[in-house]
Image: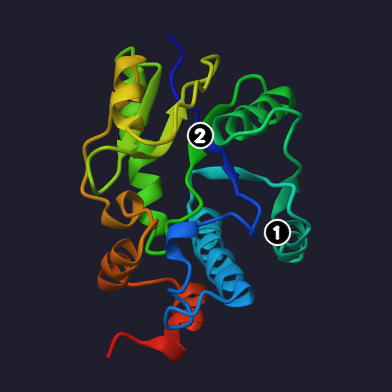
């Protein structure tokens, strides 16, 4: 069994802004739900996620999968590689497309799948999770994942070199990943576990400390 390389390559899908984060609509403009305000919030969540990823010492490459032209322009302008979705729709298909692309470039890469809505993520948390996965891989595990703060979903999945990623994200993904043979990673990592789907999730992330992009979008509608 191969061990984890010192660095990993990550893929992060971003949905079209017209459908992304529907349960957060109105969170950026006091419940109005204006399209522009909502899009800015969705972009900000991804920006803060990518800022943390790019600050992590153990992440070598980041590929974003999205066919939204605004997403491509926004993140391409700051040096993030964005590739379009493939012919088959869906979140897990997007993860697979990104993983296939990364493995084509380096067949020996360790490849990870990360959610795009982690505005309280810190680079050190991601590095620590990758290190924890490396320890499991040296003991024979092939895939490892991080359970979200609610205990039912997944925020991060990592596959050892030579192992298919097999992403199973979506409602109840923690159980599906576990049943597929992936090992849950132990570690506090509150920012890595706190994905944001609802206003309540956003408040919980704010308690941990939001990244600057999300904070800037929400400042006009502070929780005071």
Residue 154 sits above or below residue 93 on the image: below
Direction front: furthest residue: 32
Residue 197 sits above or below residue 34 on the image: above
Toward which corner of the image does residue 4 lie, by quadrant? top left
Q: Residue 71 carries which label?
A: 1
Direction top: furthest residue: 1
In this view of the protein, which residue sits in the foreground, 101 or 32? Answer: 32
Callout 1 secondary element = helix
Q: Say which residue appears at 31% left-offset and 34% top-offset.
A: 132
Q: Which mark is residue 189?
A: none
Toward which corner of the image does residue 162 lie, by quadrant? top right
Q: Where is residue 76 in the image (x, y as percent from the top left)?
A: 75, 59
Colour setting = rainbow
Q: Which of marks 2 and 1 is in front?
A: 1
Toward which corner of the image does residue 42 lie, by quadrant? bottom right
Residue at the disc numbered 2? 112
Q: Quadrant of the C terminus?
A: bottom left
Q: Say which residue appears at 26% left-offset and 37% top-offset.
A: 152
Residue 48 sits above or below residue 143 on the image: below
């Amino acid at each position: 069994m191969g061990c984890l390389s010192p660095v990993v390559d990550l893929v992060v899908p971003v949905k079209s802004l017209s459908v992304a984060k529907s349960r957060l609509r109105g969170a950026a403009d006091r419940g109005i739900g204006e399209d522009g305000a909502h899009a800015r919030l969705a972009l900000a969540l991804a920006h803060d996620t990518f800022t943390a990823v790019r600050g992590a010492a153990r992440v070598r490459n980041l590929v974003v999968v999205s066919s939204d032209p605004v997403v491509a322009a926004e993140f391409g302008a700051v040096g993030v590689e964005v590739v379009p979705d493939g012919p088959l729709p869906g979140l897990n298909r997007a993860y697979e497309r990104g993983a296939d692309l990364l493995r084509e470039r380096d067949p020996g890469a360790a490849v990870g799948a990360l959610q795009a809505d982690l505005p309280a993520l810190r680079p050190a948390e991601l590095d620590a999770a990758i290190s924890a996965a490396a320890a499991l891989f040296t003991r024979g595990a092939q895939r490892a994942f991080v359970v979200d703060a609610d205990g039912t979903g997944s925020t991060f999945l990592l596959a050892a070199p030579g192992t298919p990623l097999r992403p199973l994200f979506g409602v109840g993904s923690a159980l599906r990943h576990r049943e597929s043979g992936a090992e849950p990673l132990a570690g506090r990592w509150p920012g890595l576990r706190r994905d944001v789907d609802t206003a309540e999730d956003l408040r919980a992330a704010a308690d941990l400390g939001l990244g600057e992009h999300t904070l800037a979008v929400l400042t006009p509608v502070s929780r005071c």
